[in-house]
Amino acid sequence: MKRRFVFLLVLFSLMITSLQAQGKVEGNTLRLKGALFLGSLRTDLEKRNFYTDIIGNEYNREWENNRGISLINDWGFDYFQSVNAGILSNVFLGLHVNRFARGYEWNSFYPVGLGIKEADYRLLYSDINLGVTLSPTSNFRILPKYVIRSMSQTLEGTYLGLGNPAYFGQDTKKTTGTSGLVGVGLEFDLNDRATLFADFLLFGPFLFNTTGLYSSEQFRVSNGGVGIGYANGGYSFYSEKLSFGASVVVVPKLRLFLSFERENMYAKAQSPIAFSASENGLNATGTLMEYVAATADHRIEVSGLKFGATYDLNL
């Protein structure tokens, strides 16, 4: 039902919509945007590591340092082409880049030992937005949009086991994906300077199905031998997002905004090649868990506050 509603809304907007993106624009305008993000990030790779480690009787605690500040967030632009055809005031095209970096740390427990683990993590995603602005009233706007999102993750971990067996391990995981999503924005002007807004990504993949890659390599040397875990295959994801906040004009053409953001990206590998092996040969149970870890549906969770600015260039 939700998909049908959004699809009809997009079709309606394309047939008939003034102004946009956290405040009115006048004429043909290039709106530059940048922000910083303060909040938490949990990657789907945390759960996948948990599955691969539990089969070796090693229990991972929750990853620490998931909160932090991300400076490169929502950097980009939207270009608005004036149309002025009834309630359809303009069409817009934009590009926005988001980057998150975390240095995760966590401990693990096994029967006679303690694992000390850390990893450098990067999440990068960019959105190409295409949409229109509908203005049912002079101070209220609806902005249906289609989003092509490209996403990548990298994780490089180093693990040290203190106990029996004692071990040293390394872990590298990478994912990439591109997906088409449908969203809508809402704006309400309180007065000439202040605007309330909300932004949603409602479902996907839409029109453009997800294409991507997943790879995982774990290597471990211990006083009990050598082990390796490997998985490689396709990768798919879709996003759901909720954002709401307010913006205010501080000087002509310059706005500051503050918003609360919550976003989930549901991801999993598709038909991967997976195996786990040691010097004794293939580990059947470990191979099964490598496959399960890759193909389980887990979320990348992002939530927090975004503070930024927009500046309009009239063309």
Image: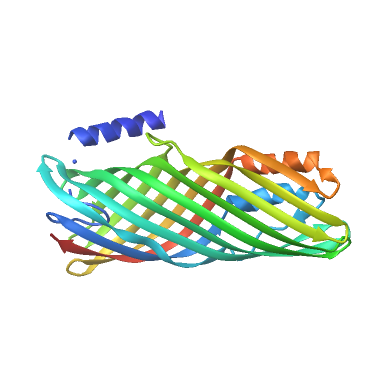
**Is residue 97 in view?**
yes
**Does residue 165 appear to the left or right of 145 in the view shown?**
right
Residue at (73% x, 56% y) in the render? 219
- Residue 124: x and y, percent? 46, 57
- Residue 51: x and y, percent? 71, 47
- Residue 167: x and y, percent? 81, 62
**Does residue 238 appear to the left or right of 181 in the view shown?**
right
Please name whichever residue, 104 or 164, is drawn nearer the observer in this view of the structure.
164
Please name whichever residue, 210 or 231, is drawn nearer the observer in this view of the structure.
231
Please name whichever residue, 269 or 80, is drawn nearer the observer in this view of the structure.
269
Q: Say if 169 sits above or below 301 in the image.
A: below
Residue at (37% x, 51% y) in the render? 127
Of the 4 image quadrants, the one containing the C terminus is bottom left
Quadrant for residue 258, please give it: bottom left
Quadrant for residue 259, please give it: bottom left
Of the 4 image quadrants, the one containing the N terminus is top left
**Does residue 260 appear to the left or right of 121 in the view shown?**
left
